[in-house]
Amino acid sequence: MEVHRELGRGLLEPVYNEALYWEIVDRNIRCEREKHLPCFYKNRQLEKYYQMDLVVDDVIVELKSVSELTSAHREQLFNYLRLTRMPIGLLINFGQAKLQGERYAYFKDDNECVLLDRNMDFVY
């Protein structure tokens, strides 16, 4: 929220990425920026890779600066969660007047991602 208050809406995603990274680091929280996620095909590692915006401890943070979040944005986060098997993913949109965020849980057993509310309960 601090980054959104300071910078407002509508800037490019890399600006929010760097600002949010420094906000997190300044709070002494472990954070990696633009972390590479390798891709494999038939047990061969490909030269191509995905690049996750931020990884904060065991949480993936995917940043957007768009007028509206779409299913494609959510699927991108879901793919990262499935590939890394990390438990929680945040999708944050800086493109609107009010900061927009969605929190998802990944369940390994079902290979499913589920929307969570602010109390970390499932939203059905």
Image (cartoon, rainbow, N blue to C red):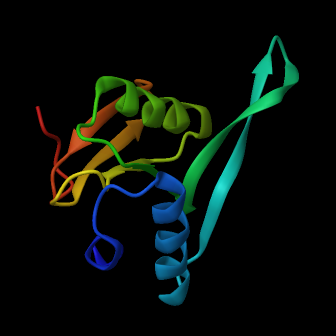
Residue depicted at x 59% and y 75%: 30
Residue 62 seen from this side: yes
Q: Position of residue 98 (x, y in %)?
A: 15, 60
Residue depicted at x 55% and y 39%: 85
**Quadrant of the snapshot with the N terminus:** bottom left
**61 to the left or right of 114:** right
Residue depicted at x 47% and y 88%: 27
**119 to the left or right of 1:** left
Say which quarter of the image contains residue 10. bottom left
Residue depicted at x 44% and y 25%: 111
**43 to the left or right of 13:** right
Q: Position of residue 108 (x, y in %)?
A: 47, 32
49 up-or-down from 52: above or below: above
Q: Position of residue 122 (x, y in %)?
A: 17, 42
Q: Position of residue 116 (x, y in %)?
A: 21, 46
116 up-or-down from 124: above or below: below
Front-most of 71 and 39? Answer: 71
